[in-house]
Image (tube, coloured by chain):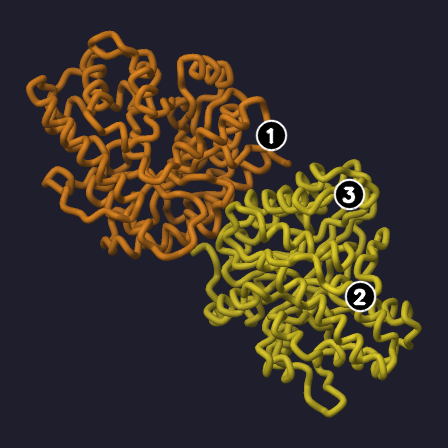
Amino acid sequence: MSAFVGKYAEELIKNAKYIATPGKGILAADESTGTIGKRLSSINVENIESNRQALRELLFTSPNALSYLSGVILFEETLYQKTCDGKPFVEVLQENNVIPGIKVDKGTVEIAGTNGETTTQGFDSLGARCAQYYKAGARFAKWRSVLKIGPNEPSELSIQQNAQGLARYAIICQENGLVPIVEPEILTDGPHDIQKCAAATETVLAAVYKALNDHHVLLEGTLLKPNMVTPGSDSPKVAAEVIAEYTVTALRRTVPPAVPGIVFLSGGQSEEEATVNLDAMNKLDVLKPWTLSFSFGRALQQSTLKTWAGKKENVEKAQEAFLSRCKANSDATLGKYTGGTAGGLASESLFVKGYKY
Amino acid sequence: MSCFISKYADELVKNAAYIGTPGKGILAADESTGTIGKRLSSINVENVEENRRALRELLFTTPGAFKCISGVILFEETLYQKTASGKPFVELMKESGVLPGIKVDKGTIELNGTNGETFTQGLDGLAQRCQKYYEAGARFAKWRSVLKIGSIEPTELAIQENANGLAMYAAICQQCGLVPIVEPEILVDGSHDIKKCAEVTERVLAACYKALNDHHVMLEGTLLKPNMVTPGSDSPKVAPEVIAEYTVRALQRTVPPAVPAVVFLSGGQSEEEATVNLNAMNKLQTKKPWALSFSFGRALQQSTLKAWGGKAENVKKAQEAFLVRCKANSEATLGTYKGDAKLGEGAAESLHVKDYKY
């Protein structure tokens, strides 16, 4: 093979396949301390460790919600936290057949000479950190690369730099037993139409898979976390079926069948939009050799957060809201979503221009 | 899309999908005048136009054979030839639902500074030629790139040059209404094992699909013609199931689902080997979003050629031999071949010629 088959190969393949189980998906709860601070402040909650812990406990102990999740991405702090009763979060997840994952990148920095394009940091001691996270129970990792659409963007430099970065991160993860989620997010910001997004997505994904091949990454032990193909944020919206068609076409043109699952990011989409688009993709009658699922952060937590508002007495109601979004997205992975779980909160756009994590 | 949507887009997609119809495959009858000369001389037949025409007529008029064939690749001379009774070969094919194809490359030449690695010529005036061929009835094209496995081969230079050449050719074909068959053949010559062949095949195919994307080729309107993944010719043979596993895995790792069909070349495999290997691939229970079929030259014609011997009185026998191989390969595309094809003389004979030059 041109792929590196190390001591973790079987496990990587097994875990990647499990995460891609139809009917399940990923909760992205890996907001960094700074980012979760913004979320908490939006509901007037202080950004201290106990509140961060309380929010995650609310999510992970939501009755029945975990049955719709195959994985949860955690921030490093959360990987080592416990419930109020003293049970490690990792154990809570494992007991419910949810695989713990870990964010391993260290944010983006600008590439000099470009118009605000970025590259992602995090390589120093990455192998050693991955080994540590594996010991702590993590079995998959996430690394977010960011690209943007503009008159000259994404530039060849940005595409190459980010593709190489993703590939290097991916192989280091595999050497240390973690399934790498490969995330080349193309931001929705801009007035471009859906065709432009499709072209950029196809070009970026082609470069990513060439880089993964160059770096000997074992595709059967990876997952892809791409943006859906949509019009830019300043462009008129289109129907879910159109988004589904363009997105699946882009994936069919670039993602080899060896990849077991594709777990979409939600970007700035509202909870309901993200679910409806995912559902439309799974309803599409065309050959899709990878499962199409979710890895949602805001699009799974938004109404839960607002319902909680930091108050103990709201926990039960907040957990119901969370369960409702989990189930909706589970249905969407099977093309069985019938809508109707949209409260006012679920339809709220979560788009923030120039969003910085 | 990042791909260029030519005015022929719908037709390209339709034709590419048709070629991959389960139960059908391609007859590669595009041997150049020089190459067909070698075949004819092996049965003591003179290499004159009439004999070249007679051989192809024998194949194209075999009763029942065209049911198993979705396309025939032709050499330029043959595109304009007719049956003895005056019917153009192209018309004969159209009537039987067979798409005519055309070889458009002009052979390989060596890359300077390499150890015998090559690139393929034929880009000059290619668009004009393709238009002409489209007018003459061709609907797909073929361009053969060649790579080899050695201590340092294939080199990055050879991979890039050949991938780029294939991509340019493919883009031009699509602009002119011809479905490009993308053929990056990695020769079987050598003492390497199957793992090495798999590694090289994956590397080469990844480079090809990156190049096709760079050149805005619409994958839904292309076909892939790769080598099967096998041990080198100087290495011990392995079971068909092993070949099937390594081959399909290599494709899973590199060929996007938008490609409608993969039509294997037979390389130096005997007629029976090629069929049995293709059959094993189609039996494999695993993800295969593209049809797996054949584009065989020698592996479809060898026993037919021997049975004919250039004599008119042998035509019927030769046609029977040809039908046997067509049916066997048709079943192989469905994974239903039982290995019981009446083996013509030479069907089990290896067709490997070291360092084969077309």
Are discs 1 and 3 located on one and the same chain?
no
Dot 1: element = loop
Which chain, by letter, is orange?
A: A
Viewer-nearest residue: A329 or B144? A329
Viewer-nearest residue: A155 or B352? B352
Which residue in the protein does label 3 denote?
A: B237
Q: Residues within 10 Å of mark 3 (few under 14, many from 20)?
A: some
Quadrant where the C terminus of chain A sits is top left
Q: Identify the residue at image location x=50%, y=34%.
A: A161
Which chain, by letter, is yellow?
A: B
Name the mark on residue B307: none
- The correct choice, above or below, for A276 with respect to B292 in the image is above
> Which of the marked residues, 2 or 3, is nearer the chain's N terminus?
3
Distance between mark 2 and mark 3 Cα atoms: 22 Å
- The residue at the far left in this view is A313
- The residue at the far bottom in this view is B85
Report the amino acid beneath label 1.
Answer: Phe
Name the mark on residue B344: 2
- The correct choice, above or below, for A269 with respect to B43 in the image is above
Chain of the residue under label 3 = B
Viewer-nearest residue: B154 or A281? A281
Distance between mark 2 and mark 1 Cα atoms: 44 Å
- The correct choice, above or below, for B113 with respect to A164 in the image is below
Left or right of B22: which side holds B229?
right
Quadrant where the N terminus of chain A sits is top right
Chain of the residue under label 2 = B
Report the amino acid beneath label 2.
Answer: Gly
Query: How far from the left and from the top, in percent, is residue A188?
Result: 31, 44
Query: How far from the left and from the top, in percent, is residue B9?
Result: 47, 68
